[in-house]
Amino acid sequence: MKIAMTGVSGHMGSEALRQTMELGGVEYIRVLLSCKKRNNKLAKKLKKRYGDRIGIVRGTIAQRENCERLVADMDMVIHMAAVIPPASDSSFSASCDCNLKGTVFLVDAVKAMVPQPKFVHVSTVALYGNRNEKHPFGRVGDPLIVSAYDTYAMHKLRAERYVLDADLHCFAVLRQTAMLNPNMLNDNISDGLMFHTALNAPLEWVSARDSGYLVRRLVERELEGGLSAFWNNIYNIGAGKKGRCTGVDTFDEGFALIGGSAEKFLRPHWFAARNFHGMWFSDANELEELFGFQRDGVHDYWQEIGRCHKIFALGKCVPAKLIDFFLFRRLLKHPNSPREWLKRGDTARVIASFGSVRAAEELSSSWEDYALMKKGDFGDYDALRDEKNAVLLDHGYDESKPLGALSVEELGHAANFRGGELLSEEYGGDPYAKLTWRCHEGHTFAASPFTVLRGGHWCPECCLPEPWRFGKLARSSPFFAQVWYDSNSEDEHYGYGFDGEGKAVLLTEDEA
Ligand SMILES: [Zn+2]
């Protein structure tokens, strides 16, 4: 088998390349590496290690020719490249180039080939947007409500839609979750990004090592010829119950390595109350049953980081007050920190993250006053994290039936549940064939029942920011309303956008 990979300089991609190369049936892997200086060293290392088994295309993914050279003559393409926050927050164009344009060019290159290689697209949990204690569990098919000003999620949502609309012969979309990796402490203490984490955000982690193992298992099963049940579908990657925690536990795990806790170093009002992303997956077992890749748990992984980096033993000798003063006070003043938005009058971002300026100002600085899932304030925490107790969202159709067995009336009902209607009068039972739909605002669009019902996508005009106009959508769509009002009030009549200079601006629902 010959495979093309993007993103091999990243956490998931490097693990996927290393572990897939261990398979004897893999003849050749061609990778794309950008011309960044640090990739020179990586290119040399890969050539030395793998010799003729590896091919390297150097250049940006945002150029059509590079994507065409990458995928030529390959049997499978595994697209893992991404520009993630905080890099995507500070450079809109870098995010657009890699997350959106790169995907478009790869998909086009795959479509032009005869026969087409199989295409694995790594998408993201960020598509689902904000969750809290009201619906911590979700699954494929839930509404996609990317958080306002999350440039990464916005481009990834558009990219995934492009993949699904492309009529590829053989594809899989893997929505990747928050990823545990050996550098995660360093990666998260240089920017205000850490304060975007809502403390009750349900997070289901997976390690980069297991994500790479998932890719290896996928290739291995494909070599064995036993993968027909996998293709042409969408999945969530997660570690299952042992990966489930909340925003605040993540800080607790990290600080435990230096003898501290979130309570000791941080204050709750520093953190956004909403507009984050992450959820626990009630369907995490779907990929696990196919590939058996879930090995690392979140707690054990943090312990492993602590053992691997001797520096954490030193950290225990540093007085907590010093760490607090030098590190977090500095990060709080970073332009990407919610407290700084409040200070600088960035009203659009403050309202998106807290509901109102007043709510942000009045948020308690005391841990005692702050209700947390972790403390048991919303019921037994261990039981809450069990998928058996998950409260699932309604997808507006009978999910016990395969999509191909639904009637045109049932598809019409699903469209009504989304606030719109199905215009096509016939449905031949091919869930991947496009039908015509209309949203509540009268936009007409073509999409397959698979994209709408299984994927959770809907009207491109209303659902692909920017601007972000989900508040208006929720008023007409029970499908979106059932989760939107978990963290938004009916009194809020906002849309969110950028002005001509890229500054965040608060819009009315009608302007959006
Ligand atoms: Zn619309």
Image: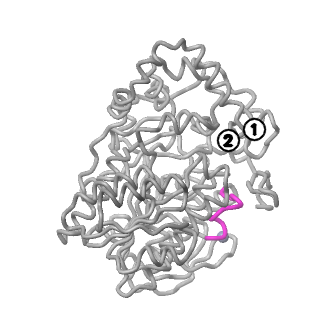
**Residue identified by numbered label 2:** 353
Q: Judging from the image, what secondary structure is the residue with disc 1 in?
A: helix
Mark pair 1, 2: CA separation: 10 Å
Circle 1 packing at 10 Å, graded few (<14), some (14-19), many (20+), is some
Type of amino acid at the residue the image marks with label 1: Trp
* Relative image position of residue 261 (x, y in whole percent): 49, 20
Whether the magenta-drawn stretch holds residue 447 is answered as no
Whether the magenta-drawn stretch holds residue 462 is answered as yes
Tell me the magenta residue range: 460-470
Question: Residue 369, relative to residue 62: is it above or below?
Answer: above
What residue is shown at x 55% (from left), y 26% (from top)? Answer: 371
**Residue identified by numbered label 1:** 341
Question: Residue 344, relative to residue 290: is it above or below?
Answer: above
Q: Report whether 470 appears left or right of 432.
A: right
Asked whether residue 34 is in view, the answer is yes
Q: How many labels does the image show?
A: 2
Query: Which of the two discs, 1 and 2, labels the residue nearer the N terminus?
Result: 1
What residue is shown at x 35% (from left), y 52% (from top)? Answer: 15
Q: Judging from the image, what secondary structure is the residue with disc 2 in?
A: helix
* Quadrant (top left, top right, bottom left, bottom right) of the C terminus: bottom right
Type of amino acid at the residue the image marks with label 2: Ser
What residue is shown at x 54% (from left), y 37% (from top)? Answer: 188
Query: In front here: 460 or 422?
Result: 460
Asked whether residue 286 is in view, the answer is no
Query: In front here: 344 or 288?
Result: 344
- Ligand 1's image quarter is bottom right
* Relative image position of residue 24 (x, y in whole percent): 18, 64
